[in-house]
Every structure is written in C-alpha cells, then in structure tokens.
Amino acid sequence: MKERLLSKEEIIELSNRDESHFYDNKAFEIKGDKIQKIAVAFANADGGEFIIGIKDKKEDKNPLKRWQGIDNMEAFNFVFQNLTQLSPTIPHSYEFLKDGSGKYALRITIEKSESVHKTVNQAVYIRKSAQSLPIKDPTQIQALSYAKGKSSYEDSIVNSALAEDIFESSEIIKFLRDYSPQSDPIEFTVNQNLVDRNSYDPRTAGILLFSDNPIPLLPKRCGIKINRYETSEEIPERAHLKEQHTVEGCLNEQIKKASEIITNIMESVKIMGAKGLEKVKYPPETIWEILVNAVIHRDYSISDDIQVLIFNNRVEIKSPGKLPGYVTIENILDARFSRNSKLVRVLNKYKNPANKDMGEGLNTAFQRMEEFRLKAPKILEDGNYIKVIIAHTSLASPEERIMDYLEVNDKIKNKQAREISGIKSENVMKRHFYDLRDKDLIEPVMSKTGTKIVAWKKKHNQIN
C-alpha cells in the first residue's frame, strides 16, 4: 500500500485546492455510483485525480475541518470494489495520504484511456472544467470514440459515393500499375477492406485514398488550406494575408501538391539574419513529415480541413482532432498509435510512399531541425485540434546571434535582435544587450541628444 505522510500545510493546501478539469475531491460518504462517475469522466477526457476524504468547501470554511481523516485504510475498500466493476478496466493508481495522527484520505489517479468507458449502469461521462457531464446522444458517444481512436471514421460507409468512384478512378489504376502482387481494383479494395465486402459500398478510407475527387463526397473533411501571411505577429490581420491555396484530390496527390506549394512559397520568404534579410531555410524533411503526419492521423469525422499557415518566422500546421488513445504531448515521439490504420497501411504500399519511415516521421522532423541548428518544433493541443509550430529560431544563444550579426553589420537595434533571436519581449532583449555590454563586447549607440540608446555596436577594443 502506497502511503504519503502529509504536513499540516500540505493538508491545508489540498483542502483549499479548487476543483478543475483534472482534479476533484469528495467526502468519505460518497456513494459507489459517484465514484464510477468521476473515474469514467476522467478516463474519457484527459485523465485526472480525485481525493476521497476531503469535504466540499461549502461544508466548512476551515480547511483543517474539511479534512476528514479515516482511521482504517480498509474502510476505503468500497472505492476499489466500485472501480473493479468497470469494464473495460480503467487505468489507475492510488495512494493513501496520512496525517500526523495516523488517519487517512485516498488519492486515486486516473489515466487518459483509449477506450470509451461507462459506469455499471451504462452511463457515459466526460470531464469538462470542474464537472463530470453525462453524454447521452449516441452521435456524441460515437464522436468520442473517434476522438479517442477506439473506432475510426475511416471505416464508415460513404452513402453519397458509388463503388465506381473507387473501382474506375485513374488513381487506383495508376496505383495498381506499380503494385505487387498484381490485382484488379475490386480484388484489392475488398482485400484491404476499403469497401464493404458484400455490397461494395465505399468506406471513407477508400474514397480518401482512391477517389479522383473526394471533396464533393466528403465536403470539408479532406482538403488542405494553405495561407501565406506577410507578418511574424502571433495573430495576423486580414491585411497580412497575401496568398491562399486549396489543395484537393486523393491523399497521395494532396500531400505532393501541398508540399510543392509550401516549398514554392518558402522560396520567397525572407527573415532577418546575420547578414540582414536572408532567404528562410527549413529542413524539407521536417515540413514533409509533419504535413504527412497531419494527413494520415487527423480525425476525419471533424468537418474541417487541415490548415497550413506560413508566416515570416514560422510555419504552423493545424490538424483536426485531438491526440488519439494513450498518445500525449509528452510521449508523442515514442508512442505508436494510428487512428487511421487503413490510410497508413495503404499509403505505405505506394511505390514511393509518403509515409516511408512508418512510425519515425516525427522523430525525423525533430532530428532535421537540430541538424539545421534550429529549435525543435512545438506540438500542442489547441481545442479540438493538434497544432505543430515550426519556428525559424536558431539554437544559438541570443548573445551569439547578436555578435554574428555585428560581424557583418555596424550596429543592431532591439527590434532587429528580436527578429533574429525569436525573443518577443523588448525588455528581455535589453537584458541580453546589457550582458554583452558587461562582458565588454558591445557598447551603446546614443541618440543625437545623448539621452537614449538607439542601437548597439561592437566595442572596438574587444579581444576575440
């Protein structure tokens, strides 16, 4: 049995802790169905923890009195009994929290799960903010299953499509020309379960892979939008938008066309560097792998396109859907979980597959950024989307970037230094200037009145 001895201060802190999306606390008198409700809600969302043995704040203003302290650990057996009744089993761990008098509360930690969980009464809950909310609508439960990767929208039947949209497409004819062993369109798609084996009704995966024009059949679910903004601002304005492109077609062609458009746009983007304005350079493998990852792992049940936003100092790729199953931001480079296994498998059968290094694409993207001496891409969950930010920020320290710039330029202003270093704050940048000044490497350039620093230059007596 795991035990942790708490100080008085820690008990007060826990008793005062606000309930949230990731935390709850309940009095010892909690009923079994409420235990299942909280556990299911956390498992169906992003995980979390709850403590049994702390009363609600409205029960008493004194945090020490809200801490109940139960004499015997065995008194909590009803908690474990209710958790073990759940099927499938919810991944969890527990810890007994012990006060100075030897009395206990119980902390249960629930992991995010790849399954959709229900209580014994077949009720589905999900954690939102500080509430465990029921989901009763079957379509919402199905959407949760898609989001978690338990089931995939790629398996759904496209009622608006015909078998001929796959069997007679130019894409599948071109694909099968290079495919071994030799197959005809019907044989191949049936064997790969891209159509219903009895009715030949096309599945979403089959339409995405081989329809010459899947957009009318799956509107706003399978395109790529590319926008070029001439700015480095976090939130661009409409005036910054210079180019827009919509990429359609089967997935293999989409990836190639989108990559070509992005490459062409990037050739015209310039960024402040050591020699002034320089053509921006990203490792092409990084853009390619992250784009491919967005296409094959997005949630196709969400009615939206993949968004590629190209700024002066970064590229953002936004893919519909949260991370599936047990995948988290922390383990994404090591986890192996495919929401759309058919798409991944069949795309890999192309003669020159887009996802050639299956399971290693993101790792390759990160490695190439390091080889280019650029900071690693940033992956984050943005509502119901996954966003990857590929910033053109050097691994060199701000001080190194400043000195590199002054090797070929007479002076450098705060704004220029922020542009080449990726630092957003003017005051933070000032501190780097002051550090270099204190090291006797640079000196200020004063205004005509001599009252204000307008730029910085190399100190003439500096010794390399």
Image: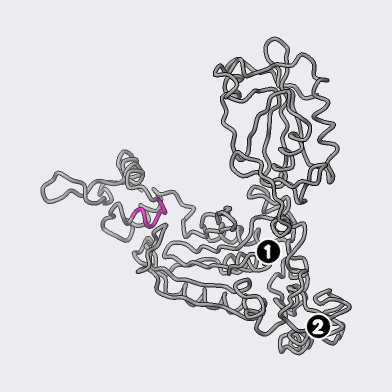
Q: Quadrant of residue 437?
A: top left
The residue that disc 2 covers is 179
What amino acid is found at the position of numbered circle 1 in the picture? His
Above/below status of 7 relative to 91: above
Of labels 1 and 2, earlier in sequence is 2
The residue that disc 1 covers is 297
For the residues labelled 1 and 2, the Cα–Cα distance comes to 24 Å
* Mark 1 residue crowding within 10 angstroms, few (<14) / some (14–19) / many (20+): many
Above/below status of 298 relative to 207: above
Q: Position of residue 242 (x, y in %)?
A: 40, 74
Q: Where is residue 46 in the image (x, y as percent from the top left)?
A: 66, 45
For the point 72% across and 44% down, which residue is it? 43
Q: Depth check: give the residue in front, 230 or 430.
A: 230
> Is 119 left, or right, of 333 in this rendering?
right
> Is 461 left, or right, of 136 in this rendering?
left
Closer to viewer: mark 1 or mark 2: 1
For the point 73% across and 61% down, which residue is it? 339
What amino acid is found at the position of numbered circle 2 in the picture? Tyr
The magenta segment: 417-423
- Outermost residue, top side: 101
Circle 1 SS class = helix
Q: In which quarter of the image is residue 145?
A: bottom right
Q: Quadrant of residue 142?
A: bottom right
